[in-house]
Structure formats: C-alpha cells, structure tokens
Image (spheres, helix red, strand yellow):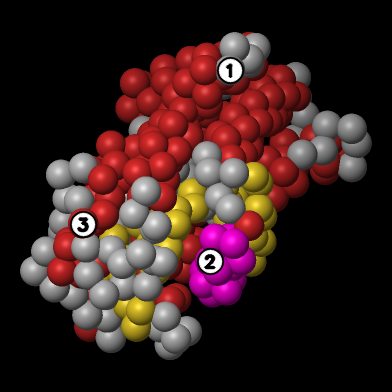
Amino acid sequence: MAKIAFFGLGNMGGPMAINLLNAGHQVKVFDLFPAAVDKLVALGATTAATAKDVAADAEIVVSMLPAGKHVKDLYIGTEGLIDVLSPGALVIDSSTIDAGSAQETAKALQASDIAFIDAPVSGGVAGAAAGTLSFMVGGSVDAFSKAKPLLEVMGKNIFHAGDVGAGQVAKVCNNMLLSILMVGTSEALQLGMANGLDPKVLSEIMSKSSGSNWTLDVYNPCPDVMDTVPASNNYEGGFMTDLMVKDLGLAMETALASSSSTPMGSLTRSLYSLHQKAGNGKKDFSSIFTAFETK
Ligand code: NAD
C-alpha cells in the first residue's frame, strides 16, 4: 500500500481521498479548511501542521486544487513541496489547470528527479464519490504506469493522452465540445417547444435520430424530461456554470496559444459568461436551457 499525501479536500478531492483510504492506502491530508481535514481524519487519514510536513515522507502526492497558481505555489512556489519530496516520488495533479502551468511545474520537479503527471478528471462530484471518474493523463509512460493502479481506485476510465500537459488539453477539448452540445440541445428543444412539441417526445425523436448526443441522451436540460438530472432538481447538483466558464476560459487560452480557430467554443464561452453574470453561476451548466425560453 502506498504512502500518499493528498492536497485539496473540496467537493472533488474529499471523496477521491476517501476512496484511496477505503482501498487501504496510508493517506495524509491537507487543506486550508480545517473542517475538510477533520472529516478525513475521522475516517482514518492522518495530517500534520504544515503542507511540507504532510508531504515529507510521501511516495505519491495527489492534488485537487482550484487553479494553476495554486498548483505552482504548492509544488514549486511559496509552499515549496519540491524541497521535501524525495527523489523518485510521483506527483499526480488532478486539478483542471492550464497546460503551461502543468508543464512548468513538471519541468522544475523533474530537475529534482520527481515525476509529475497532469490527470484532470471528468465525471463530477458524483463520479468522484462513486470512484467512476475518467482520468485524462499527460506524462511519461513510466509515470503513467506507476499512477494507473491509484487512478483505478478513483476512476473507471483511465486514458494516457500524451506528454505532460496533454491531459489538460484533452480536458478542455472535451468540455468545450460538451458546452457546444449543451447549448445546441437547449436551443433545439426550446425551438420545438415554442412550436407546440412535447419536449419528451422531441427528445426521444432526436435521441434516435442524427441529433443524438450525450446532453440529450443522459443529461437532458429540460425539466421533467428525465428524473435524475439537475434540470429536474431546479438545476442543483451536477457541474456548476462557474466551472464551465472556468474551463471555457482555459479552452480559449489553449486556442490562442496554438492559433486554433474555435468559433463555436468562443460563442459558448460568451453565452456561459453572460449566463453566469445573470446569477446562474452556482446552478448546473444545463440551466443555459432557460436562457432560450421564449416566454
Ligand atoms: P473546491 O473549491 O470544492 O475544492 C478545492 C479545495 O482546495 C478547497 O477545499 C481549498 O481549501 C483547497 N485548497 C486550495 N489551496 C490549497 C492549498 N494550497 N493546499 C491545500 N488545499 C488547498 O473545488 P472542486 O470542485 O473540488 O474542484 C477542484 C478541481 O477539480 C478544480 O480544478 C476544478 O476545476 C476541477 N473539477 C471540478 C469538478 C466539479 O464538478 N466540482 C469536475 C471536474 C473537475
């Protein structure tokens, strides 16, 4: 069983750390919120006074933090875990951040013989709790092979996308496409409803026709078409609009850096940004459906 240090016990990191504990690993945890740490300690994790103390004897470090600056600060900046990690240690960063920050962190750690993979996830809070996340990994084949058994404890689908940063690129490509599908599905359903169609009937027709896609088939944005989706729960739970706006911002940075044309992604970023500013940031991203209401 591995000695793991886990940083960032929020909505995603908390349940991921619990799954590692339940699989029998020795998990030492750290978060800026004491209550998040206490919860894990009550379940069998250990902790220490400082981030460096938590990481000092770890074989593997996992982090699940808000943004690139937090990841850089933790490993190679103000918090400086690079000073205490042993040569041969492996860092798995599952935060959704820009590929550049992942590459910069990996390069600095590599100079101290510490391996790094970026391993952002898809599947949300429910997937984190159920241990069914999809991991999109960037890093060396060796580091990927070493990380895979741990990732399999927290997830169901584990993909090696390429070198460091490739996991983050895969993640923003996926979420940009997801946002486009969600906006298109919302638009089509509202058009049908405005012209007298029952959204359940229209959903069934499109789902068995060429308009079929994930948002229509398993995450329908129209209330009461499906029982267990956020749309039928006042758009609570699921994947917040705030996080979609963050990911679309990262997608636009990635597009700029590579001179890629992403007109649909650019449009959905603007739409989601307006939707967020209209007070929907904490609602599930399928709530964009309401922006197309005709009355
Ligand atoms: P969250 O805000 O719930 O949790 C982040 C945690 O990190 C907080 O508890 C915070 O205190 C802690 N933290 C910040 N700086 C720290 C530091 N230096 N040391 C230790 N802990 C620190 O966020 P979340 O929803 O768990 O998301 C985490 C990451 O996962 C983000 O990058 C997000 O984009 C990504 N993500 C989230 C979802 C989702 O549905 N919530 C889905 C996929 C990916």
| Amino acid type at image mark 3 | Asp
25 on left or right of 186: left
Q: CA distance from mark 2 to mark 1?
A: 29 Å
Q: Quadrant of the N terminus?
A: bottom left
Residue positioned most to the right: 209
| Amino acid type at image mark 2 | Ala
x 47%, y 45%: residue: 239
Magenta span: chief secondary structure = helix
Question: Mark 1 falls on what kind of element?
Answer: loop
x 38%, y 26%: residue: 276
Write down the region rendered in magenta: 142-155
Q: Are marks 2 and 3 in contact (CB under 8 Å)?
A: no
Q: Which residue is mark 1?
A: 258
Q: Is residue 37 in view? A: no
Q: How packed is label 3: few (under 14 Cα within 10 Å), some, or many (20 or more)?
A: some
Image mark for residue 83:
3
